Amino acid sequence: MTEAPTTQEQYACAIHSMSLRVEAGRQGDADLLIAAGWSKSRFGAVMMRLHSEWDSAERRGCRIPRKPNRKQISLKAQEIARHARAETVEQVHSDQAKAEMAAAYEQELKETMRALKSLPAARLHLSIKLAMDGCQSAEEMAAAVLLHWLHPTCPACCGRKFQLVKWSEDELSDQACGGCGGSGQAPVPGGEAGKAGANYIDDCVGIARQSIRDKLRHTR
Ligand SMILES: [Zn+2]
């Protein structure tokens, strides 16, 4: 009879499957184990701190990096093809566009990580949680979900909910934004796994808030 894996074995397996140690450079096994061992309340408290770090970074002009979409990649590929004086956009141009835009996104992500001190550790914890739940690209998913949580505003309408009147820069029409369907918020990235990650964050933040309220009540 095989025994079910212990939590520690699950952690070990999840950690082993990730490349974070190499990618983040300065994070070692110790950081991974610490982040893995956080309680929900601890993670929730870190997320609250992360949000206030984001608020002040945003005031300094920091922006959330967005993964390039298909349209942006195709525009970039057209530009590359034009520069190469090619008559049509070929696979090689699309590949180059994809690679360049992915590199730019990674670079922006690194800068955001540097600006938000709690982000690397929060990402580690969420990556481990997602990997343990069977998410294949846990690190990428964790970063996307965390950034969305910090700044869920729809990038197409910037949260205005409606499309602008043609040629106008600020006058709203009565047409709902096609990007968000009029909610002003972008959908959580990453389908079901992304939604599970976002729910986990909300759950943890709720627990952390409750524990702060409890402490305040006891000290009164
Ligand atoms: Zn929108």
Image: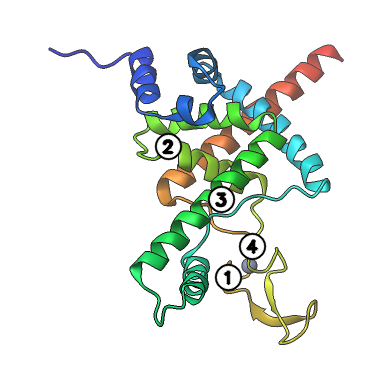
Residue occupying the point 37% across, 38% down:
135
Gap between marks 1 and 4 measured at Cα: 12 Å
Ranked by sequence position, the earlier of labels 1 and 3 is 3
Query: Pointer 1: what residue?
Result: 181
Q: CA distance from mark 2 to mark 4?
A: 24 Å
Tag 3: Cα neighbours inside 10 Å, few (<14), some, or many (≥20)? Answer: some
Q: How is the image coloured?
A: rainbow
Crowd band around label 1 with a 10 angstrom C-alpha radius: few (<14), some (14–19), many (20+): some
Mark closer to the chain start, 1 or 4: 4
Identify the disc placed on residue 138. 2
- Whether the residue carrying mark 1 lies under 8 Å from ligand 1 is answered with yes
**Image height check: is 117 above or below 173?**
above
**Is the residue 22 above or below the residue 33 in the image?**
below
Label 3 to label 2: alpha-carbon separation: 17 Å
State the quadrant of the N terminus: top left
Query: Measuring 54% from the left and 44% from the top, which residue is drawn there?
Result: 145
Which one is earlier in the sequence, the residue at label 2 or at label 4? 2
Give the CA distance from mark 1 to mark 2. Answer: 28 Å
Badge 3 or badge 2: first in the primary sequence: 3
Could you tell me the amino acid type at mark 2? Ala
Amino acid tagged 1: Gly
Residue 201 in the image: x percent, y percent?
57, 36
- Which residue bears the numbered disc 3? 105
